[in-house]
Amino acid sequence: MYAKRIIPCLDIKNGRVVKGTSFVGLRDAGDPVACARLYDEMDADELVLLDIMASHEGRGTMLDIVRQVAAQVFIPFTVGGGINRVADFTQMLRAGADKCSVNSAAVRSPQLIADAAEKFGSQCVVLAIDARRTQGSRAADTNYHPETPACIPAELLLDETSRYEVYLNGGRVPTGIDALRWAKYGVALGAGEILLTSMDADGQKDGYELPLTASISGAVSVPVIASGGAGKLEHFYDALTLGKADAVLAASLFHFGELTVSQVKDYLHERGLAARQAFNN
Amino acid sequence: MRREGRGGNLPPVVVRRRIEVRGIRTQARESAGERSSPACVPARKMLYYSAKTIAPRGRNLIAIVDYGAGNLGSVQKALAYLGAPHCVSADADTIRAADAVILPGVGAFGDAMGALRTRGLVESVQDFARSGKPFLGICLGYQVLFAASDESPDVAGLGLLPGTVRRIPAQCGDTTVKVPHMGWNSLRYPKKSALFGGVPDDAYVYFVHSYFVQAQDPAIIAATTDYSTRMDVAVAEGNLLGTQFHPEKSGKVGLQILRNFVELSTR
């Protein structure tokens, strides 16, 4: 049976996993390759490696990490952070990544999605969207100063019906763009998957943002990965059912060992959802 | 290309030719007026070294066919991890002389067949398939084993196995699914085959595809999976093996399947 996917995310800074210090059983909890291998052992379905510095200088280090992970871990993995041009896709995919995710660069230049999809195929292109709740168009809000890139079509902008807005820079900069319409537009351009992070729910451990995920997942024909808000086992189940997500992503919850991937999968199993449980050779 | 592998023996003598491989570009289906979703990832523009290798005696060399169909890097890395001697080749003689061949594949059916033709590899691949030596087609490399695909109606496949390749329906009865079929799905085995030795029932493997195989002869089907419809996702007919899923991306299960193939190549 087609399974829902559980995807741990490694935040990488200067070649080290951040928030990896509490990783039980690892001699070097900051080593991205060791973390990736451990997650693979623990039945993670895919991995996301996020370069949170995304600096030009750090690119070489990130590429090395990608190469080493690809040589030792044989599950799909996505690389994100600082993917700004098609050449970045080329580098990362050549190094061994299976998919690249784009966020701000896609908002600033949506053509990037189409170009990357044309060259590498839609399923190499993940559109990462950071979204916050909004009430309509916020036109009356005098403190509201969105930065809307010039090449965003007017029909994607917020209006009275909008419930979520696209944010950039880690959820800090509003764009005036309706998240649902942006997701549909991105998929039409060629994005093969959506990585949807609720900046309201992120870090709160109070559950994923279900209305956000459900509305986008129901509107697009590609898989949607829910991100932001996981705190308990029930949250994963809710995101994959009520939230209609195809996959769930979590970072610190797994890093700190509060929950393991296996625990989540066992729980999903108990509640009747298909989850992949590998075997040991 | 750096040769990886823990085989021991002297490294083979390698004659290298540097060639530029053109990527396969997916063609949008303008007639449908919608963004096409390729069967798999189209090729990337990459520079490969095509090695015409002379392998030392006793070394069982698996040739991975390089026809610009991308992502053979993951297959290479998996074989390296397993310590299996292998090379990447676009050379007809090397392919014919190999002890086993893997035909990877990402992209659209028509583009893949076009790429094989452009590189003059159709005959050598067909010859190898008929040689009785182990042959494994992966993903699009599995689909082209058949005669034709709905994805590219005017293009002939390699025609090594009877069957058709159809688009995965988004709707089947009450079920609506997303296409491409992307993610992990479980296998059933209508028959025993060496490819799945040591792999348990309902094992999960990783898929990324929009088209699926319907084999004409049920006797060749080695594994099926269920999505919006039942799909034939692995075949085993004598030396001819094929998987719709990516064993090089299917974790331990995938490595076991590749290990089984490597073992077949050493017999």
Image (cartoon, grey):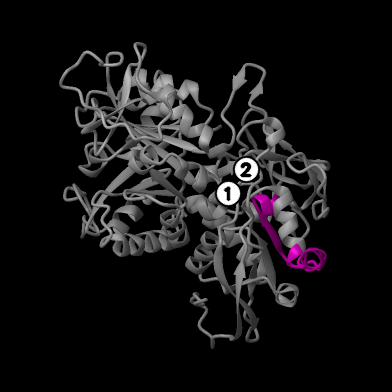
A171 or A95: nearer the eye? Answer: A171
A157 and A39: which is toward the camera: A157
Identity of the residue drawn at 21% across and 59% down: A28
Circle 1/circle 2 CB separation < 8 Å = yes
The residue segment tinted magenta is B118-143
> In the image, what residue type sits under mark 2?
Pro
Give percent across and percent down for residue B16: 60, 82
In the visual, does A207 lie left or right of B169? Answer: left
Give the SS element for disc 2: loop
Chain letter of the residue beneath label 1 in the structure image: B
Mark 2 crowdedness (10 Å alpha carbons): few <14, some 14-19, many ≥20: many
The image shows residue B220, relative to residue A241, as above or below, that is below
* Residue on which the image places disc 1: B41
In front of the other: B53 or A155: A155
Name the element at disc 1: loop
Residue B235 visible in the displayed image: no
In-image side of A169 versus B106 (left or right): left
Rendered image: mark on residue B38? 2
Residue drawn at point x = 24 percent, y = 26 percent: A201
Taking the spot 68% from the left edge, 59% from the top edge, the residue there is B136
Q: Is residue B126 magenta?
A: yes
